[in-house]
Image (tube, helix red, strand yellow):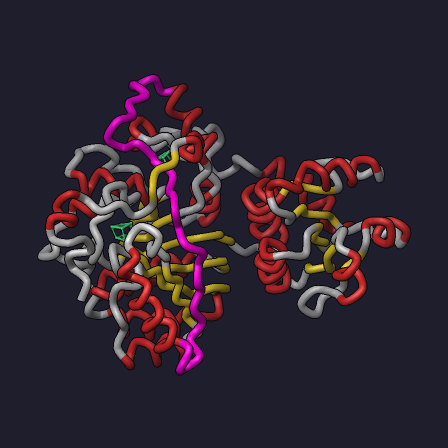
Amino acid sequence: MKWNKRGRELDKRAEAIVKEFADRKQIVLFGAGQRGAELRKILEHYGIFGGFIDNDPVKQENGYEGAKVYSLEAFHERKITSWIAITASDSNVGVIAGQLENAGYKREADFWHYEEFIKDIFPILSFYFFQKLFVYLAQISVTERCTLHCKKCAHACHKVAMTADDMKLDMAKESADFFFRHVDVVNEFVLIGGEPFLYADLGELIDYIGRNYREKILTFAITTNGTILPSDEIVELCKRHRVTVRVSDYSDTIPKLQPRYDLLYDKLSEVEVIAWKTKKEDCWFDYGFEEVDRGGNVCQLVGAFDRCRTDCREIRGSRYYYCVMARTVPENMGWSIGVEDYLELKDLQDKKILFEYQQGFSEKGYVDLCRHCRGAEAPQFLIPAAEQTEKAKESQGCIQVQ
Ligand code: SF4
Ligand code: SF4
């Protein structure tokens, strides 16, 4: 979206939301499952979680992870005025929205679908009602070197030589400093790569962020491809600062990675570090960076950007990138586009400018990479996950595995 009223872009909408929320006071989540549990954590941080509604009689009877679970009838009978966010799986959202409408609730007045709630409503509520700048997901890419060479790496890390420089530790610390100077709550703050366990200063960075900013982070995570066993020191620091290690499981495409995952999980569980065993990734979206060209029509590019609404922000020194791929892909491919597609935080005086940028506003209304990216259409283009480049295959696959 293009800025029209920079610094006042969302004021009017926010006024209505804040006024309404002052009467509602709480949010109830329709769908007591994984998505509901994640949103519950955010709402509890703000003290506005009002329980669950769920159609499952067992959950209604027993509750869900210690929380009250209403049937829709019970919720309705008690005349509870809380807002409702639908946190059911995508396939059930339509049915639940229908149930709510049949019971007299109105969309965008009484209830919201998850995506619109977490991307639009909640950040406004957080900023204007609680005076807290909320970010859903932000990353520091500490290295773009990687032990795997995936053909369709979304950060184009397969183009980065193993001899390339990593981010300097001072810059990594400065990135965190600039981010948390302005941001009050981040749902997930991730150290990412490339392969972050290649980063020589990872321990010191975890400790720095953990000591200085941990209370602003709901989930502090490292995303790894699982090929490197972290040192005892790193594992200990992960435990101390409650870092979640999320392992991208590519064993469907590269079966020989499975024993490495097992070793990693064993090591993490020995000291009770939280590990997210993601389900095996068998396919990825193909963003089509090397094939797509939407042309230079600004309206089309703004349209592509607005439809996309990616969650993945990046902080790199004092530069805040709306789309992490819009920085990494051109840089790692050697393309001279997108070099100014960031918000400079160094001299930022008005926090609202960052809030609006975070919500998708900018001078251009898009980033250069949108021209070469399928964005919202990417889920229609599936490819096998983690297929290795020919160069990697010639070297018997995952060539850099240690
Ligand atoms: S594991 Fe593959 S997708 Fe992940 S950063 Fe490395 S090359 Fe990219
Ligand atoms: S480059 Fe792609 S992922 Fe990034 S904002 Fe544009 S369409 Fe979305």
Residue lying at 40% horizontally and 47% vertically, measured from the top left: 312
139 versus 383 height, above or below: below
Residue lying at 41% horizontally and 70% vertically, measured from the top left: 243
Specify whether 93 is left or right of 337: right
Residue 141 image point, x, y percent:
28, 55
The answer, for residue 343, to whether it is visible in the render is no
Specify whether residue 294 is painted magenta: yes
Specify whether residue 232 is painted magenta: no
Residue 189 image point, x, y percent:
41, 60
Residue, far front? 255
| Count of marks overlaid on the render | 0
197 versus 349 height, above or below: below
Q: Quadrant of residue 292?
A: top left
Residue 4 image point, x, y percent:
47, 28
Residue 29 image point, x, y percent:
69, 53
Q: Quadrant of the C terminus?
A: bottom left
Residue lying at 15% horizontally and 56% vertically, measured from the top left: 399
Q: Quadrant of the N terminus?
A: top left
Residue lying at 62% horizontally and 40% vertically, measured from the top left: 91
For the record, the magenta segment spans 269-298
Ligand 2's quadrant: top left
| Magenta segment main secondary structure | loop
